[in-house]
Image (cartoon, rainbow, N blue to C red):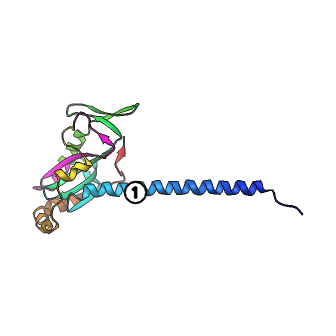
Amino acid sequence: MNHLPATPILVALVLGGVVLGLGLSWLWRWWRQRRARRRLVHAITSTGFEHLQDVLVPDGSGSTYHVDFLVLTPRGILVVDLRDVAGNVFGGDQMTDWTVMNGASRHTFPNPQGALYDRVAAVKVLAGEVPVEGRIVFTRRAQFPKGLPKWTVPVDALRAEFPPGDRSLFDGVLAGFSGGWAAVRSATSPSALGRPRPL
């Protein structure tokens, strides 16, 4: 009586187990990243009553700026430039480039303050009398050992600077800011650029 060799069956079982393990590992990482992203978005958007995410704002010259978040807060409209870098960040108001050091790795990126000023100015044109502020928000992976440059804030400190308003005040806030907020909403369009962009 002929028997099939056990080796091909064993190899198939091992390969199947490896593929299943890799698939489950990928699914777990994907779920954790998705959950972390939701928490990050909530940390930003919970500072206000309404928000827009990943939108294009006209710059007044026929082009547009990508804006990560526009949040209608009790203080007005908050423009959020979200940055995701890992390591120690060394930056300053007068520096052309900021440096990130993570272990042996070192790289630079352009000072984001100028781009933030441009985005805030573009939103101000649309918002009319509604106050507009901007912040460069860094995720938890970044540390600033030499201090935070102007308009820069860690995501965990954003709510302290922009405490969420009482929902019972929403109608009053919206009544005061409704015209400017509506103008901003109608002038924006969806952006294909999703952030935070790793640097």
Give coordinates of residue 20: x percent, y percent: 59, 57
Residue bearing mark 1: 34
Quadrant in which the C terminus is drawn? top left
Q: In x, y percent, where is residue 86?
A: 36, 40
Could you tell me which secondary element the residue under label 1 belongs to? helix
**Is 181 contained in the magenta span?**
no
Picture quadrant of residue 172? bottom left
Residue 145 in sight from this viewpoint:
yes
Say which quarter of the image contains residue 185.
bottom left
Residue 28 coordinates in the image, percent (x, y): 47, 56
State the residue in front, 39 or 56: 39
Q: Which residue appears at 23% of the width and 58% of the height?
A: 187
The 10 Å Cα crowd at callout 1, few under 14, some 14 to 19, many 20 or more, is few
Q: Is residue 132 magenta?
A: yes
In the image, 160 versus 185, the foreground residue is 160
- Residue 93 rendering spot, x and y as whole percentages: 20, 34
Which residues, given as a range, are shown in magenta?
121-147
Whether residue 189 is visible = no
Q: Say above or below: 60 vs 47.
A: above
